Amino acid sequence: MPPKSVPLPAKPSKPYFFYGHRKPSQNRPVVYGGLFSNRQVLKPPQSPLPPSPPFDLRKWDPHHLSQNPSPPPISTPHQHSKLSPIARFIIDAFRKSQYSWGPSVVFELNKLRRVTASLVAEVLKVQDDPILASKFFHWAGKQKGFKHNFASYNALAYCLNRNGRFRVADQLPELMDSQGKPPTEKQFEILIRMHADKNRGQRVYYVYQKMKNFGIKPRVFLYNRIMDALVKTGYLDLALSVYEDFRGDGLVEESITFMILIKGLCKAGKVAEMLEVLRRMREMSYKPDVFAYTAMIKILVSKGNLDGCLRVWEEMQRDGVEPDVMAYVTLVAGLCKGGRVQRGYELFKEMKKKGILIERVMYGVLIEGFVKDGKVGSACGLLKDLIDSGYRADLGIYNSLIVGMCDVKLIDRAYKLFQVTVQEGLEPGFATVKPMLLVFAEMRRMSDFCKLLEQMQKLGFSVNDDLSKFFSFVVEKGERTIMAVRVFNELKVKGYGSVLIYNILMGALHKTGKVKQALSLFQEMKDLNFEPDSSTYSNAIICYVEDENIKEACICHNKIIEMSRVPSIDAYYSLTNGLCKIGEIDAAMVLVRDCLGNVTNGPMEFKYALTVLPACKSGAEKVMEVLNEMMQEGLPPDNIICSAIISGMCKYRTIEEARKVFANLRTRKLLTEANVIIYDELLIEYMEKKAADLVLSGLKFFGLESKLKAKGSTLLSR
């Protein structure tokens, strides 16, 4: 019998010190897959950070950021695990020095017996501090027997660009040339690709010019890259100049070269020049495919050049290129949006003859186009065709048809379509019912209007909010304001109404000059126990001022203050102007300061009014300088500015100085003679009032009130 085979002993499960592949180097071995080289980097447990103290503006140092710059981002351990041991040593030296170049870093680096260019490139690939990377690159270049190679230069370029120092990276070709390593096309290609990826078209052209200065001619591929980057960033003229250099170098165009130029010319609307490039492309036995033609049409549609689109379509048919669904949809959509729906419909019929599958989106585009063109019958025919083709109309199509039917006053048919949307579960919104509500209001069919509101409420509409939107839409045209008020008068009887609707109608009535009606709505609102908000009171302030009832306007202002709210800018301006007209200049100046302290961007008249007040200290000439600056901004002096002049001159100067300013404005025809007389009377009255206030203050100071009262004087009782 043959002897039995003895089984071999099993290999120990414990791995050896070294196994796998090892590639020796001049200094030390680099091990892949070994026990020690395959170590995992363990993150130390992170202790919770202490809560940051609250920010104190008084202790804030504006120079803190510049004195204590944040450390650069650190590469991940996963990146470091791929580095060689020497590269890890260098990175650790950077880390120990807190990523700042200094003697400690140089001391650690001097421990290395030899530094190679490939090692420099390896370190720079993971370095995220451009300053530290540049200093390390410079230090390595000074080592004995060291010379940078293309890999190290390229790594520095990537590092600088990655960290936003692309202008410094553009100077690397000069550095390479000065160090006896003239740049090649590859170095310029790297820079061009970096700028192109970030859409820096002018930098691409700058690097290209520098490339020409070094006497390097790009290949066709790089020429295409340069022209494409310039076209995408809107520098078509520069791209055409590069193309002239391309032809001057005797290079032969590729199809992509022609397409780059064609797209750029289409974007610029230069159809004639584009057709010339297309002719040259045909001479080179190249022909755009359907995707290229579709891209051209899409660009021209985005620019609104419909004639150019049709010309490109003719060229596509001339080349025998069969358009696909995307080409048809792109062109038809552009024609419909541009008001050429009939031409789009002809293309639609052409598609049907060819048996091309027509998508629902094309039906929607054509229906919307026919509705805008007033051809509602054609739009309804397309809806029937859509349903016969097996499609289900979406809400957008139904909305377009409802708008079209309401435009021609076919309100009953529009209402039936609305019922269809509800039955099909399309969840109609306010855009669906808005045109029907408008037609019902115009035709005074308020019973149908309310019936539609009830149905909206059953469908989950927020009726009061939608009514607010409806009234906002109606009063956009001033002539419909009376209709809006009439509709609201009938609706509020049935319980429909809100503060927002009152605000909308008050504002609309004021704009149309019907101030009395706006104030009657305000009074009615209070009678019906609606709580006015700040917008209501702001509207009321404007109306009361125009009605010359400044007292009620001030009451409304105080109501807003009691609510801890701020009046509108228009209300501030209107009330301030009204106070100035009745001579309450001090109260007006208080309002000016209050407005600028509460709103983000107050009226320029208020800002110049506060500038005029301190300017009055220096006299009439300084005030005129402020007024000249104001007029250069397109703001002539108004009632508020003139009141500020009166207040400032009475406080700091004399009446004669104020009269000099008004006389100058009269000479320059910025004030009429009647206005000068009015302001002179206000000036005298205001000065007398201030003088009387000073007298009363003196009497009170010396304790003479009792003597005056004993003699029957009523001076102090005012």
Image: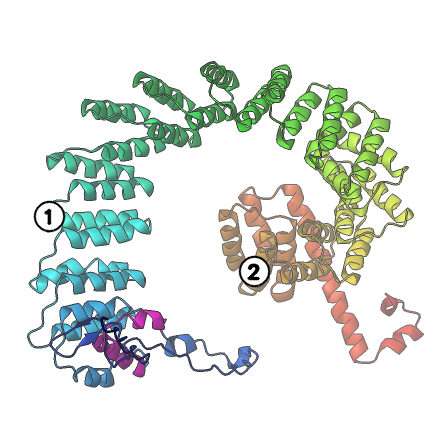
The C terminus sits in image quarter: bottom right
What stretch of residues is rendered in magenta?
72-96
Residue that label 2 marks: 611
Identify which residue is drawn at 39% across, 29% down: 300
Q: Is 78 a magenta residue?
A: yes
- Of callouts 1 and 2, which one flags the residue occurring earlier in the amino acid sequence? 1
Q: Secondary structure at mark 1?
A: loop
Q: Is residue 303 visible?
A: yes
Residue that label 1 marks: 216
Q: Secondary structure at mark 2?
A: helix
Residue 21, compared with residue 658, is above or below; it is below
Q: Nearer the viewer, residue 565 or 236?
A: 236
Image coords of residue 526 (percent x, y): 88, 49
Left or right of residue 420, residue 202 in this image? left
Left or right of residue 716, residue 295 in this image? left
Identify which residue is drawn at 22% across, 63% down: 155
